[in-house]
Image (cartoon, rainbow, N blue to C red):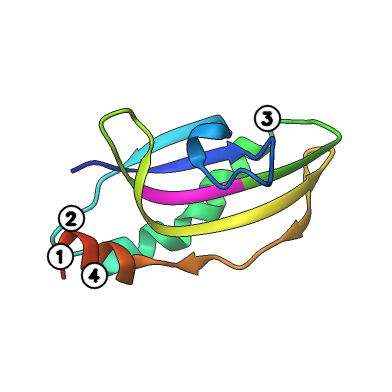
């Protein structure tokens, strides 16, 4: 199972499905799917915002709502099991409002039967 960082622009906020958003950037993240509660996963979650900041600087539009997530990658290259996510409101390429990173590992651990 592969994992990665996903950065999406949410073009239609009422559609809470990644497939309906615009993918701005992706990067693979090497994680052990049988050890999602370990320190490597915690570090990957902590590094997610730094990774996104570098890619957000490349996208300058008047106003954007973006989603950053660390997730397993399904067969279509889309997020499947989200380990953590964060939302940002962007204005002219800079964060206007940033949300808190939400750690959702417990859901993935249950779904995958991992520890």
C-alpha span from label 3 to label 1: 36 Å
Q: Nearer the viewer, mark 3 or mark 1?
A: 1
C-alpha span from label 1 to label 2: 7 Å
Q: Which mark is residue 23?
A: none
Q: Is residue 105 above or below residue 69?
A: below
Question: Which structural element holds mark 2?
Answer: loop
**Going 78% across and 38% down the picture, which residue do you hit?**
93
Q: Position of residue 114 (x, y in %)?
A: 15, 65
Chief secondary structure of the magenta portion: strand
Q: Residues within 10 Å of mark 3 (few under 14, many from 20)?
A: few
Q: Which residue is mark 3?
A: 58
Q: Is residue 69 magenta?
A: yes
Residues marked 1 and 2 touching at CB (< 8 Å): yes
Q: Position of residue 70 (x, y in %)?
A: 41, 51
Residue 57 vs residue 71: left or right?
right
Which span is picked out in magenta? 67-71
Q: Which residue is mark 2?
A: 33
Q: Which residue is mark 4?
A: 38
Q: Quadrant of the C terminus?
A: bottom left
The residue lying toward the viewer, choosing from 6 and 18, is 18
Compare marks 3 and 2 and give the one earlier in the sequence. 2
The residue lying toward the viewer, choosing from 29 and 78, is 78
Question: Which structural element holds mark 3?
Answer: loop
C-alpha span from label 1 to label 4: 11 Å
Q: Residues within 10 Å of mark 2 (few under 14, many from 20)?
A: some
**Going 58% across and 34% down the picture, which residue do you hit?**
21
C-alpha span from label 4 to label 3: 32 Å
């Amino acid at each position: 199972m592969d994992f990665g960082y996903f950065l999406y622009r949410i073009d239609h906020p009422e559609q809470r499905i990644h497939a309906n958003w615009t993918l701005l950037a992706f990067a693979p993240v090497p994680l052990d799917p049988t050890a999602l509660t370990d320190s490597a996963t915690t570090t990957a979650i902590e590094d997610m915002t730094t990774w996104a900041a570098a890619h957000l600087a490349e996208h300058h539009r008047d106003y954007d709502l973006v989603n950053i997530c660390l997730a397993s990658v399904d067969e279509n290259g889309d997020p499947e099991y989200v380990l953590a996510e964060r939302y940002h409101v962007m204005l002219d390429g800079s964060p206007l409002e940033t949300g808190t990173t939400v750690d959702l590992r417990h859901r993935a651990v249950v779904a995958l039967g991992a520890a």
